[in-house]
Amino acid sequence: MPSSFGQTLRVTVFGQSHSPAIGCVVEGLPSGIVVDQDALATFMARRAPGQGSWTTPRREEDRPRIVSGLNVHGATCGAPLAAVIENTNTRSGDYANLLKVPRPGHADLTAWVKWHGNQDVPGGGHFSGRLTAPLCVAGGIALQVLAARGVRIGAHLLSVANVQDERFDALDNSPAAQAHLAEQLDTLSAGPRYPTIDADAGTRMLAAIDEARRSLDSVGGVIECVACGMPAGAGSPMFDGIENMLARAAFGIPAVKGIEFGRGFEVARLHGSENNDPYEMRDGVPTPKTNNAGGILGGITTGAPVLFRIAMKPTSSIAREQDSVDLESGTNAKLSVHGRHDPCVATRAVPVAEAVCALVLLDALLSYPAE
Ligand SMILES: Cc1cc2nc3c(=O)[nH]c(=O)nc-3n(C[C@H](O)[C@H](O)[C@H](O)COP(=O)(O)O)c2cc1C
Ligand SMILES: C=C(O[C@@H]1CC(C(=O)O)=C[C@@H](OP(=O)(O)O)[C@H]1O)C(=O)O
């Protein structure tokens, strides 16, 4: 079961949700980067479980212990960086019945088919959203490296159920839109808050999540992520483009079912005259005036904001009774899932989208820079 991605900046994630620990190994980080551990802890806290009724009640401190890759000054030293996070709050009994009655929508049955019952079911094993914690350790460090290079990444919940947040102002590439986008990112990064630009949309999303939870159900959502300050010329056609790399890494986030870039699927309904991003010279630099392309053409960055959206499905583990099968007796069975689950996984996946974006863009800068 390979569990790695990246070309020059290579990330491996290990562990299971209920094993003693989970972690990551990151190879290829530039040396001499002093890791800001407080900023990393703040970033990790945004993803952590146990934040309230809109998340799983499982509480974990999620404090990463970096066991290699740093020198005595706390700076990256060129050796692979390895980080470990303890699993301290497992309740494997919740999964006793799920060994033989697989949850519709989770990976229980596909894992059973593949590993004949040897798979680690409790907590979702290696399939679990818990594995996004070490992804955030690696990505949190990559975010710091990119920030020092003038690249700023932010994400928000564009929608949960039928509730919409305002969009990032990233499809227009005018100086006014760029300034507005910077304000939107400032709003999102101003202290701990529910990850919407419009606070009222966040309140309505929380109400939709609560309503789903009370009716023994769950809801999905869309995360929008943007990276500003990426220089033009990073990436490579045709299999190592920024879209290819982002899609591969984004589908590593459990529950992601779709990705779109820039104007996304909507472009299929536009004319070329509407979808093209015309150019103008700005300070001697050819610059797209608009950004329907989401900052990527031919797999290569244009210099405009890199913009993508990922669709997160509704949590599969729901208390409402559903049809399943009993794998021991070979009969049909009914299943209601009890235990500790997120009624909407999209909210806690927002920092994970930022982490993945940072890892991919840093890898693209290291592997396929502008020549
Ligand atoms: C941050 C995060 C938290 C998650 N929490 C849960 C959860 O509590 N219960 C659940 O059934 N699925 C949860 N998931 C989703 C499952 O892990 C995922 O649906 C499952 O592994 C199957 O993978 P797939 O949906 O990508 O096919 C979570 C995902 C993420 C990213
Ligand atoms: C622990 C986390 O989320 C878990 C992700 C998850 C799943 O199926 O993906 C199922 C639940 O696991 P458990 O039954 O052990 O509580 C969540 O709590 C985390 O994100 O850190």
Image: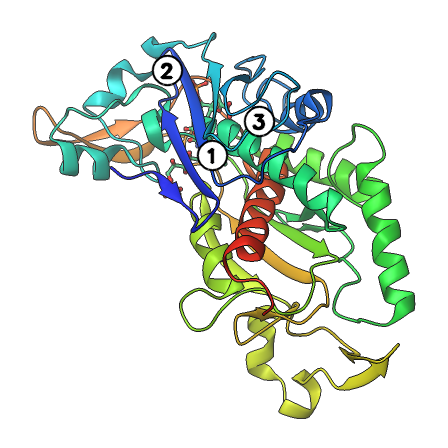
Report which residue position mark 3 lands on: 214
Identify the amino acid type marked 1: Val
The residue that appears at 62% across and 69% down in the rendered structure is 233
The answer to whether residue 318 of the structure is visible from this angle is: no
Q: Earlier in the sequence, mark 2 or mark 1?
A: 2
Identify the amino acid type marked 2: His
Which percent across, then down, holds residue 243? Answer: 51, 63
Q: Earlier in the sequence, mark 2 or mark 3?
A: 2
- What's the CA distance linking mark 2 and mark 1? 22 Å
Q: Is 172 on the left or on the right of 91, as rendered? A: right
Report which residue position mark 1 lands on: 26
Q: Quadrant of ligand 1?
A: top left
Which percent across, then down, holds residue 136? Answer: 56, 32
Residue 2, placed above or below residue 307: above
Which percent across, then down, holds residue 116? Answer: 11, 30
The residue that appears at 89% across and 68% down in the rendered structure is 175
Q: Label for residue 18?
A: 2
Q: Is 188 on the left or on the right of 347, as rendered? A: right
The residue that appears at 47% across and 57% down in the rendered structure is 245
Residue 187, placed above or below residue 206: below
Which percent across, then down, holds residue 178? Answer: 85, 62
Identify the amino acid type marked 3: Arg
Q: How is the image coloured?
A: rainbow
Contact between labelled residues 1 and 2, with CB atoms less than 8 Å apart: no
Q: Does the beta carbon at disc 2 come under 8 Å from ligand 2?
A: yes
